[in-house]
Image: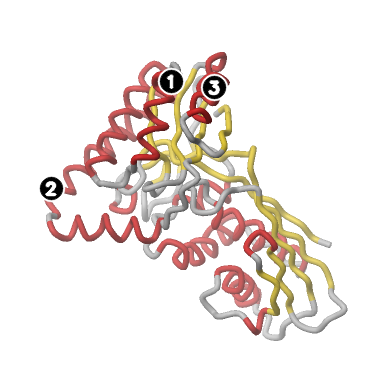
Amino acid sequence: MSSASAPGKIILFGEHAVVYGRPALAVPVRQVQATAEVEASSRSGVWIAAPDIGLASELAQLASDQPLAAAVRGVFSALGIAGFPAIQIRISSSIPVASGLGSGAAVSVALIRALSAHLGQPLSDEQVSALTFEIEKLHHGTPSGIDNTVVTYARPVYFVKGQPPETFKVGAPFTIVIGDTGVAASTKAVVSDVRQLWQTAPRRWEDVFDRVGKIARQARAAIESGDLSALGPLMDANQALLQIMSVSSPELERLLSAARAAGAQGAKLSGGGRGGNMIALAAKEKAPAVAEALLSAGAKRTIITQV
């Protein structure tokens, strides 16, 4: 049997604007992960079992745009394999779906790595990321490429669409509290809505995206220098621009307010918005209190992670 795992991720700064060429910062979240296991099967064909989404099927019975099927076929194509071997694939994940934690990308990365290893031709990180990006298009329509990049390399990433990803150093560790609204939101739909706004008034929205990009660059400098006092206000400023983009929600705003009231130094949504997760910067000793405040305010789950 071959197996592989991949972490979740959070976007610290720059979501949505990253689709339009501005920089974004993202980091892996290792407290949650997706795992894929591949082994030889006594049954002919490729069988895929993903209990978390209620899927148990033979590859030939799945549509070409079903993400797991597309990932499997993508690996076969990349390796030049024409016939389907007799194998069983099992997928499991502790990453909440449609919550901004990179569930789709993590599943794809784990599956691609496990399958290519089982076939004796493990793909490089660059190949894994490129193939995962193609699968991300099925999830998100016009993805930026940040999810597949940070999940594949499992390191803090400074990302600009169309440019080679840059990993960056963290000058001093910092603590992020993640709060899940429990509201599933389609990133594909939200990205499409933002695109419609941009199409109606390109100059206005390019200015908004420029402001987000400036915040992301300032945040990278602060993180690399260890100037954590600057991060909280930058998170709040980024959130204000996300509100202007209309991608926040009452559930997110309630959690953001609760985090700040409990001592968080800054807070914002993370990911597509309209649900999913928010993140809060907190001193390590205050993180448990912030997490408790989030739960009291309606968060379905929290994660405390150190970057």
Q: Which residue is mark 1?
A: 264
The reply to whether residue 157 is visible in this rendering is: no
Q: CA distance from mark 1 to mark 3?
A: 16 Å
Label 2 element class: helix
Between residue 61 and residue 2, name the one nearer to us: 61
| Amino acid found under the numbered disc labelled 3 | Pro
> Who comes first in sequence, dot 1 or dot 3?
3
Q: Quadrant of the N terminus?
A: bottom right
- Name the side, left or right, on which 6 lies relative to 220: right
Image location (x, y in percent) of residue 152: 58, 51
The residue sitting at 45% across, 50% down in the picture is 146
The residue sitting at 79% across, 74% down in the picture is 87
The residue sitting at 69% across, 51% down in the picture is 5
Q: Quadrant of the C terminus?
A: top right
Q: CA distance from mark 1 to mark 2?
A: 31 Å
Image location (x, y in percent) of residue 225: 43, 20
> Who comes first in sequence, dot 3 or dot 2?
3
Image location (x, y in percent) of residue 171: 49, 21
Judged by depth in the image, the label closer to the viewer, 1 or 3, is 1
Between residue 289 and residue 222, name the one nearer to us: 289
Q: Which residue is mark 3?
A: 173
Residue 142's tag is: none
Label 3 element class: loop
| Amino acid found under the numbered disc labelled 1 | Ala
Residue 204's tag is: 2
